[in-house]
Image: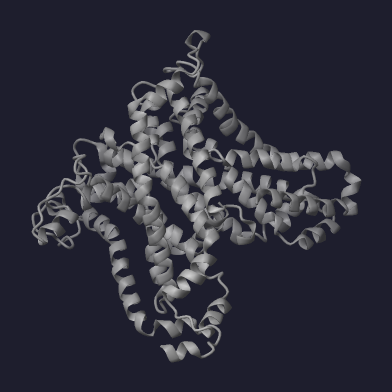
């Protein structure tokens, strides 16, 4: 070890040098942690496919002998928790929220970044000031507004107030500031205005950025709980998370159905994770570091 | 940072205006285009953030129970504020938050940094490990609360935690169902840790990859040993900007903790963070919107104050770091 460190180190070989001894320990520690992190997923799967008797059995059962597929039918035919409706609501809310947020924040961000209006900075400071208000604190005031609009227990109340995300607009503005100006200039020479340049040049060339923002927004919207709980007062307007929480606090509860419901609530995001993880990671790096 | 970005925009905007095509349209046309882009967003921001906050500030001076438009008779001045600040339940919720923050902030920080460093060192299956640690981020707090409450820490014999304790001959623990001893903190902290740690780990990995390799090489040439020495003198100082940002993010997220507290210990008055308390005051059986608004504003001010102090203390906005 000491001999190696005294030698000038070739570029890129640093890790190889120091992990001689510690490498295996490091790998083993990571493996143990990975197993720990996966336990909750295993529990969801195990319990969702077991019968209630198997879950509460005295000896630990690693996996049900025969997967109880009939749980699926029972869950969706249970009238006390409208899971199918809740899934539809969640899908609608998350999709429309993502599309709406992206449209509104990208246009606003571009306008703030690129259009030489005299008072653009003052407008930008207004947006920045709203970022100082912690998101979750505004649920009381926003509830007041939404209830006076009559949007309680209404998908409009679930979606529209969440679209005007100052933080996303801020991120878009920062991104568009760094967009290569030459591309837009070329478009203008060809006779396009700002609107044309935005839609034909800027948006088609910002795929990665927009996808990252979209994935993060979708995940956040699908998983959000406080706002849907505040607004979704009647069962027809429950999202998956609200339905699940009602199920959780119900007096009589079937454990296997509960966990199956959790699995169903999580499944769409697992797919997002499997296929779009690259964008999610990129989105986290973007949103986190600039926050 | 915002200020410097804005001035950069000014500079760029000026060069943009020099393009001949835009001169012809004139100032009015530019103004109109600007508002076409920005107005829909700004109007929404007004309606759903700025006006509600102002309205809520107005309501906070009234006894607005079950109503959003109180009559002048209901005016109580600072009554709601004094009532809120002297309410033992509200004070308790602040204490609960402080205890929670004292656990969750350092633990999340250390674990996410640790994982990032370990991942940075491992040479095989790195993408796999990263995915596994990041995967809980796809899980909602509701789903996690369900697993924690009904399977791992359900307080009965067939729960996972008690099954494992039983192997070591330890008696069953009620975890969530008794406030004393406060085992519920372990449940709540481990849940949030599980969900969040991957998120901050990603931020640290991104920052670790930004550290120039030549710093380490220079240190090795000077005889430094890999390990604690380079960690304290190179890695940690280089991660300063990210560390400050991550600490703030963890703290702000902790302020807004709601889902898991409501679902796991919502019925336990001694374990109620501010948001759960506000939710139960303003939107529970009695819709005490005046009180709720006052509480929300007090909380917002507290958060702003702490963020500001933390920023000052840790030197946030030190532009050379960014």
Q: Position of residue A112 (x, y in %)?
A: 71, 46
Residue plotted at (72% across, 46% down): A111
Residue plotted at (54% across, 38% down): A133
The picture quadrant where one finds residue A178 is bottom right
Q: Is residue A154 visible?
A: yes
Q: Position of residue B247 (x, y in %)?
A: 47, 53
The picture quadrant where one finds residue A22 is bottom left
Horizontally, is A188 left or right of B243 in the view?
right
Horizontally, is A92 left or right of B132 in the view?
right
Residue plotted at (72% across, 56% down): A200
Q: Is residue B290 visible?
A: no
Horizontally, is A190 left or right of B49 in the view?
right
In front of the other: B301 or A91:
B301
Q: Position of residue A278 (x, y in %)?
A: 50, 64
Horizontally, is B77 left or right of A267 in the view?
right
Residue A167, placed above or below residue B272: below
Residue plotted at (42% across, 17% down): B65
Q: Position of residue B39 (x, y in %)?
A: 69, 37
Where is the N terminus of chain A found, in terms of image quarters?
bottom left
Considering every residue shown, the one lying at the far top of the view is B73
Residue B44, placed above or below residue A42: above
């Amino acid at each position: 070890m000491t001999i190696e460190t005294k030698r000038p180190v070739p570029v890129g070989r640093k890790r190889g040098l120091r992990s001689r001894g510690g490498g295996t320990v490091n790998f083993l520690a990571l493996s143990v942690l990975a197993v720990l992190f996966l336990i909750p997923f295993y529990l969801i799967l195990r319990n969702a496919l077991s019968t209630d008797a198997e879950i509460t059995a005295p000896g630990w059962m690693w996996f049900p002998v025969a997967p109880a597929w009939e749980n699926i039918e029972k869950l969706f035919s249970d009238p006390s928790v409208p899971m199918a409706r809740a899934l539809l609501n969640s899908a609608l809310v998350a999709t429309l929220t993502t599309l709406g947020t992206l449209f509104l924040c990208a246009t606003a961000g571009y306008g703030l970044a690129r259009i030489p209006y005299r008072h653009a900075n003052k407008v930008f400071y207004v947006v920045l000031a709203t970022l100082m208000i912690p998101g979750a604190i505004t649920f009381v005031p926003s509830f007041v507004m939404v209830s006076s609009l009559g949007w309680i227990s209404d998908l409009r109340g679930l979606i529209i107030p969440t679209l005007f995300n100052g933080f996303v607009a801020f991120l878009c503005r920062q991104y568009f500031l760094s967009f290569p100006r030459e591309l837009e200039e070329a478009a203008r020479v060809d006779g396009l205005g700002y609107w044309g340049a935005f839609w034909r040049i800027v948006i088609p060339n910002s795929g990665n950025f927009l996808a990252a923002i979209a994935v993060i927004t979708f995940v956040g919207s699908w998983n959000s709980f406080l706002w849907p709980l505040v607004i979704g007062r009647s069962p027809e307007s429950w999202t998956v998370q609200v339905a699940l929480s009602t199920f959780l606090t119900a007096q009589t509860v079937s454990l296997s159905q509960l966990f199956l419901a959790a699995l169903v609530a999580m499944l769409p995001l697992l797919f997002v994770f499997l296929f779009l993880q690259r964008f999610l990671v990129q989105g986290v790096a973007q949103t986190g570091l600039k926050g | 940072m915002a200020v410097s970005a804005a001035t950069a925009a000014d500079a760029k905007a000026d060069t943009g205006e020099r393009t001949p095509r835009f001169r012809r349209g004139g100032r009015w046309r530019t103004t109109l285009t600007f508002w076409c882009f920005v107005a829909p967003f700004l109007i929404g921001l007004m309606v759903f953030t700025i006006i509600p906050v102002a309205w809520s500030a107005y309501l906070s001076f009234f006894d607005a129970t079950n109503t959003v438009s109180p009559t002048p008779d209901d005016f109580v001045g600072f009554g709601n504020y004094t009532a809120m600040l002297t309410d033992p339940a509200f004070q308790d919720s602040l204490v609960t938050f402080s205890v929670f923050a004292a656990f969750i902030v350092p633990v999340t920080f250390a674990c996410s940094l640790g994982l990032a460093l370990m991942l940075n060192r491992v040479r095989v299956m790195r993408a796999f490990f990263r995915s596994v640690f990041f995967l809980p981020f796809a899980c909602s707090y509701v789903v996690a609360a369900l697993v924690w409450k009904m399977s791992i820490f359900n307080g009965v014999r067939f729960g996972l935690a008690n099954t494992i304790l039983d192997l070591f001959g330890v008696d069953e623990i009620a975890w969530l169902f008794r406030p004393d001893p406060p085992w519920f903190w372990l449940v709540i902290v481990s849940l949030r840790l599980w969900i969040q740690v991957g998120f901050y780990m990603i931020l640290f990995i991104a920052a670790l990859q930004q550290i120039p390799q030549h710093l380490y090489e220079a240190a090795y040439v000077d005889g430094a040993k890999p390990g604690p020495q380079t960690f304290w003198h190179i890695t940690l100082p280089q991660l300063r900007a990210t560390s400050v940002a991550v600490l703030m993010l963890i703290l702000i997220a902790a302020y807004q903790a709601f889902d898991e507290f409501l679902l796991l210990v919502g019925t336990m008055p001694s374990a109620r963070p501010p948001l759960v308390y506000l939710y139960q005051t303003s939107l529970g059986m009695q819709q005490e919107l005046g009180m709720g608004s006052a509480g929300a504003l007090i909380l917002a001010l507290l958060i702003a104050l702490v963020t500001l102090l933390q920023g000052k203390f840790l030197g946030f906005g030190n532009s050379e770091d960014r």
